[in-house]
Amino acid sequence: MAERRDFYEVLGVNRNADADEIQRAYRKLVRAYHPDVNKDPGAEDRFKEISEAYSVLSDPETRRRYDAFGHDFRQVPPDVDPADWARARSRAGAGARAGAGGGRWRSAGAEDFGFGTDEGIDLEDLLGGMFGGRGRRQWGPVPGADQEAELTLTVEEAYHGGRRSITLPGGRRLDVTIPPGVTNGQRIRLAGQGGHGSEGAQPGDLHLIVRIADHPRYRVEGRDIYAPLPLAPWEAALGATVAVDTPGGEAKVKVPPGTSTGRRLRLKGRGMPSPRGAAGDFYAESRIMVPPRLTDEERRLFEQLAAVSHFDPRRRS
């Protein structure tokens, strides 16, 4: 029977790894080896190995016992000192090597735990008898793995929220409730919709990572929304109140006299809503536009303005 791999080696982390490192390594491996995604013949066995390693190392107490006793940690009684256990295993191994020469042998380590001095004792059989068979390799149910998937939304969908039907790898369809005001990178947790657990264990969760798609008009940064605001030259020069479209509907923005291209006009609270605090802001970014073709009257007026104006946009103040 092949020797079992160290759980830290299975997850590809060192023995000093913290809980976050272990979780990140586990999620990365799950995405690579989950049977619903990876159809290689050995992927399912690798996935089970990864899940078992994570179930042990993600629990602080179980991890402590694994660090102390290795793969025997489920066999060892709670009050056994790790040093005593190591000595017992060492003596049992020495006895086994002596027995290989043809003689009968006694488990030298068993005596240290008060298990008597019977000859021909196998340590694993002995522990199994003492603890109702728990010394045998019985790993028990393994909880399902958490899984991740991306959920791409338009700016309007992210703003308003609502229901959305998604299709996961393998053809599974889910109806998802999207809360209003989700932001780029935010996670939506669907409890129990992740990987299946073994032997009736609880399934994992599915985490949907929100990605807001590029929009022809809006740019989203956090909860703030930016959009261009086209202005006629006279609106920018004289000032005006103009309508602007936002994801939440039309709003009015006041353009101060003397507005140049690039000026940001803020509409407080008209950005992405927030379920636990203030909404973001909406910024209208001025863009001064000129008529592509002038009428005779427009040309006359612009020429008249050019003749009387001393404004030079290239002169440094």
Image: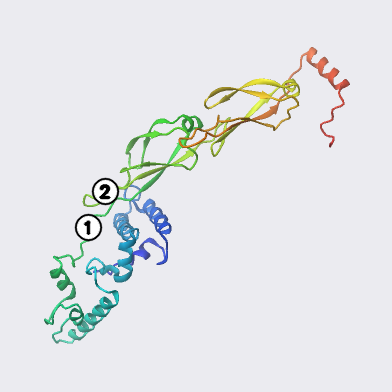
Q: Residues within 10 Å of mark 1 (few under 14, many from 20)?
A: few
Q: Is residue 166 above or below residue 34?
A: above
Mark 2, secondary structure of its residue: loop
Mark 1, secondary structure of its residue: loop
| Label drawn at residue 140 | 1
Write down the residue under mark 2: 202
Image quarter for residue 56?
bottom left
Q: Residue at image x 31%, y 50%?
A: 35
Q: Position of residue 23 (x, y in %)?
A: 39, 55
Q: Residues within 10 Å of mark 2 (few under 14, many from 20)?
A: some
Q: Position of residue 311 (x, y in %)?
A: 84, 27
Q: Residue at image x 83%, y 34%?
A: 314
Q: Residue at image x 83%, y 15%?
A: 300
Q: Is residue 21 above or below residue 191?
A: below
For the N terminus, the image quarter is bottom left
The residue at the far top in this view is: 297
CA separation, marks 2 and 1? 13 Å
Does 225 sit left or right of 104 as displayed? right
